[in-house]
Amino acid sequence: MAPVLLLRSQLAALFLFMMAGFLEEATSFASEILQRKVTMLDLLNPASILLLRYDFVFEYPRPVMPNMVFIGGINCAGKKALSEQFEAIVNASGEHGIVVFSLGSMVSEIPMKKAMEIAEALGKVPQTVIWRYTGEAPPNLSKNTKLVKWLPQNDLLAHPKTRAFITHGGSHGVYEGICNGVPMVLMPLFGDQMDNAMRVESRGAGVTLNILEMTSKDIADALNTVINDIRYKENIMRLSALHLDRPVHPLDLAVHWVEFVMRHKGAPHLRPAAHDLNWIQYHSLDVIAFLLAVVLITTFISFECCLFCCRKCFCKKGRDKSSKSKMQ
């Protein structure tokens, strides 16, 4: 049975390079099950269906293959009730509401100087800030900022008192922000996060900051802008309405296509034939070589014909001149 793959890379080569480490567990597991050495390409090539965490509400239009299924927002689960700890924080925020701040699970701490700049900025806004941070607490942390080692991100974003979302621009967080209609302040770190941040900003749903160059004033200004400028809320709500207006939830759609592949023994009819082509065929090098040969042969024949005509023409003129001189 052909595997069903979940892809998020825009360039295949870049994807293979970046995901080699992440897929090491998958290749080891597959090798153990199949009792033979399995590489990453062995997992990718037989795929009949590609599940892509895209939604063209957020992405730019582009041509795609028929076996690509778009499940952007699959991580946006239904809202759950907050625990007593977080419910108490949210309720104590009053009319100003809260700001959710998380730079993802891969960032455990940041340099103290930068953490102090961020803490200073967060202290300038009237909202209560729930900051997921596992590093050493900045000494200038304000009373309105609550440090937690973990937070229920989607549930907090779904709360009506949430005014803004400070995020690193990972696709999970961005789609949760879109699903719940929360304007964003984006601090991209690496990978596709810069691209995600620019897409959000281009749609008027957030403000992007350079995490290396930003100052406490920049952070405070960005927060106040997305919270107080009604256009950001309107734009993110428009994106949210477009994203949620679909007949099937992305999770249900993914389940359907996984089961479809299982029911139809790998669904090989969906697999692109390009995977069976060699490097020369895939890049049409044989066709290019043939066309180049045709052009060169045509050019050569045309050139020889021109030379032949020129020789005939000049030779005739030469004979005519010789005949005239002899007659004289």
Image: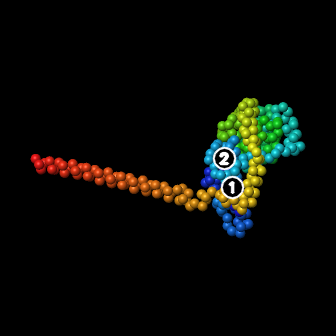
User: Closer to the N terminus: mark 1 or mark 2?
Assistant: 1
At label 2, counting other C-alpha atoms closer than 10 Å, the crowd grade (few under 14, some 14-19, many 20 or more) is some
Select label 1 or label 2 by which is in front.
Answer: 1
Residue furthest toward the right? 84
* Residue under the image location 69 percent in, 41 percent down: 57
Q: Is residue 214 something one can see in this rendering?
A: no
Q: Is residue 185 left or right of residue 95?
A: left
Q: Is residue 199 left or right of residue 279?
A: right
Say which mark, if any, is on residue 49.
1
* Residue under the image location 79 percent in, 41 percent down: 157
Q: Position of residue 236 (x, y in %)?
A: 73, 37
State the residue in front, 250 or 89: 250
Q: Which residue is mark 2?
A: 192
Residue furthest toward the bottom? 35
* Residue under the image location 88 percent in, 39 percent down: 88
Give the residue type at disc 1.
Ile
Residue furthest toward the left? 328
State the residue in front, 223 or 266: 266
Secondary structure state at the residue bearing disc 1: strand
